Image (cartoon, rainbow, N blue to C red):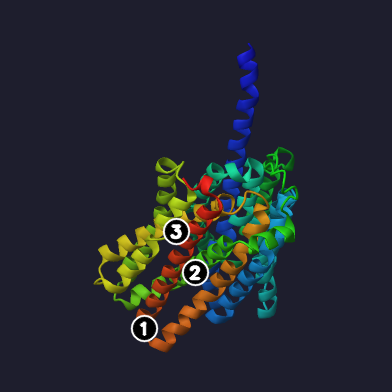
Amino acid sequence: MTGTADASPVKRRAGSRRWFITGLGIGQICSWGSLYYSFPLIAEQMGADLGWSKPELYGAASLGLLLAAITAYPVGTAIDRGQGRSVMAGGAMLAGLLLLAWSQVEHLLVFYVLLGGIGVVQAATLYEPAFAVVARRMGAANARSGITALTLWGGFASTVFIPFVQLLLDHLGWRGALVVLGVVNLVICAGLYLAVIHPSADAAPPARRSDDPSPLAGRYAIAWAARRPTFWALAVAFTAYTATFSAFLFHLYPLLIERGFDIVTVVATMTIIGPAQVAGRIGIWMFARHTSVRAVGAVTVLGFPAAFIALAVLPPSFAVVAVAAAVYGASNGIMTIVRGLAVPEMLTPEAYGAINGALTAPSTIAKALAPAGAAMIWAAAGSYDAVLMAIVTGSLIMVAGFWLAVLLSMRSHPAKAS
């Protein structure tokens, strides 16, 4: 009887944790699908309807990403203070209202204001805040399984929402599609975040050494991190990573068309990336669950230059681009997990939200600016060869930055280096 009584709280905690990750994961599918993956599809139909150009439309998206970068730090700090439920549920509610307002837009200036607001709520509802919430719930040092599971859920966002949004556009038009997506955020996303995020269930903060009694938090945590070379090496690595993948994804379609591939082949190639991301994450879950993030990341970053160099130098064929897309997708899927776990393993398990938010800010700026930068390189060179060389260079900077971060963190935390 005693054993049964003792086991029941453990089972309840395990069940509660599964529900927490499941609810948060479904919310992430809907948040990513409605706030990120839907934009190119909606923008295409919206531009044709209102007569707005691609630069005008995508300029609003870049503004939103820049504001997301500015918002990342205060969002992370708020979650560190136990306000994750208010941040994510409130962000989803605001996202729903902004999408509903977007469905009625007629003027470009209003569109820019709304997309700026959507950038802010992306910083409050997508992976970075969700990772911070998981780190608080499970303890940053023990969050690996939760963050990995969450990325498995999130990996299905494009698979579910791209055809769903296209279906809405075909039957309801872009305005009707935005109304549905707004309701999805108000009902599903906000409802799930309210239901599963409970600050009272958060893990106890990690114990500190007796000679260092002040807890890391807020600006003090950022000042502490800024004195660590590992932080800056990670910042370089993640910023280069975000710039390369943003430029690559935005320009992959025209790049392959320029290389002589037909549209069916291009679309088939691009559809490989999503499943490859999920496959990479499942592979880590099954075969490298207990391998250090340092080791996983040090190997994973090599996949990016390998894929880009193959596209740049090998003869164009479907086999080459398909393999390159698969390698890129798997590497990108695993890198999402590495980004989520690098701070607690390579820097500190404390102040996860604030420090991760500080690392996210330059990455988000790079994400916003890289597509336009790649377009400028293409215009100056007249082909995508120069763009690919720039992307290869960015990926090599990412490799150098991450490897340097690994060496520095092993020197700082030798006990965790194995």
| Tag of residue 383 | 1
Q: Report how far apart the C-alphas of labels 3 and 1 lie in the structure.
A: 25 Å
Can you identify the residue that label 3 sits on?
332
Mark 1 → mark 2, Cα distance in angstroms: 22 Å
Q: Name the image quarter holding residue 286.
A: top left
Q: Residue at the location (38% across, 81% down)?
A: 386
Q: Mark 1 or mark 2: which comes first in sequence? A: 2
Mark identifier at residue 240: 2
Residue 341 lies, in percent from the top left, at 55, 51
> Residue extending furthest front?
211
Asked whether disc 1 touches disc 2, contact meaning CB atoms under 8 Å apart, the reply is: no
Amino acid beneath label 1: Ser
| Residue 35 vertical placement versus 256 (above, below) | above
Residue 286 is at least partly visible in this image: yes
Q: Image point 74% across, 39% down: which residue?
A: 200
- Which element type, helix, strand or loop, lies under badge 2? helix
Looking at the rendered structure, the secondary structure element under dot 3 is: helix
Query: Residue 310: image x %, image y %?
Result: 30, 68
